[in-house]
Image (spheres, rainbow, N blue to C red):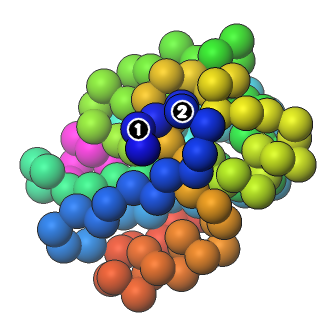
Amino acid sequence: MSDNEGTPVVPQAPNGPGLLIHAAGPLEPDTLAGILRSSANARAALEPGAAIEVVVQGPGVRLLTADSPVSETITHTRQLDVEVLACANSMRSAGLETEDLTAGISTFPAAVAHLAERQWQGWAYVRP
C-alpha cells in the first residue's frame, strides 16, 4: 500500500544500513524543523544514496499534518530523499488518520518495533 492510503506501511529497508533519526515526545515546530535540517545536513555529508529516515513518535506526530507550520520543511526534506515516518500508534493517540499527513509521509505500526528492526539491520541511531 502506498503513502497516505489509510493503512500503516512499513517502508522497505534499502540495501545496507542507513541513518535513523528518532524524534520522540512532544515537539515544538522549531524543534522538528531543526531535526529535519539535521537530516538535510546528514544527506549532504553522507555518501550519495545513503538511506536516512526521520521517525516521529509521540504527540509530535501532530506536526506532520498537511496544515502544520513545518509542512513546507517536511516537503523540502522529502525532496532530498529523506524518509519521514509517523508511528501509527502515536497517530491513533493523537486522533490522526493517514490522510491528515503531509504528502509523502509513510507510516508504520509501532515505533519501538521499527527502531529495533533498523538497529538489527545495522542502522545508526540518533536521537537529537
Q: Which mark is residue 2?
A: 1
Q: Position of residue 90 (x, y in %)?
A: 78, 52
Determine the image quadrant of residue 111: bottom right
Question: Marks 2 and 1, Cα distance to the nearest angstrom?
Answer: 6 Å
Which residue is pictured at 28% across the width and 31% down the height? 80
- Report the quarter where the N terminus lies: top left
Residue type, label 2: Glu
| Screen quadrant of the C terminus | bottom right
Residue on which the image places disc 2: 5
Q: What is the number of callouts on the image?
A: 2
Task: Please give left or right for residue 74 compared with residue 44 in the image.
Answer: right
Q: Secondary structure at mark 1?
A: loop
**Residue 118, position as x, y percentages in the image:** 42, 75
- Could you tell me if residue 23 is visible in this image? no
Kind of residue at disc 1:
Ser
Foreground of the two, 82 or 127: 82
Whether residue 86 is visible to the viewer of this picture, yes or no, is yes
Q: Name the residue rendered at 41%, 87% in the picture.
A: 120
Nearest the viewer among 59 and 32 is: 59
Does 9 appear above or below 40?
below
19 relative to 87 in the view: left or right? left
Residue 15 x %, y %? 16, 68
Marks 2 & 1, CB-CB < 8 Å contact: yes
Would you identify the image quadrant in which residue 62 lies? top right
Residue occupying the point 46% across, 58% down: 10
Which segment is the magenta one? 41-46
Magenta span dominant secondary structure: helix
When the figure is inspected, residue 40 is found, relative to residue 75, above or below; the finding is: below
Q: Residue furthest bottom?
A: 120
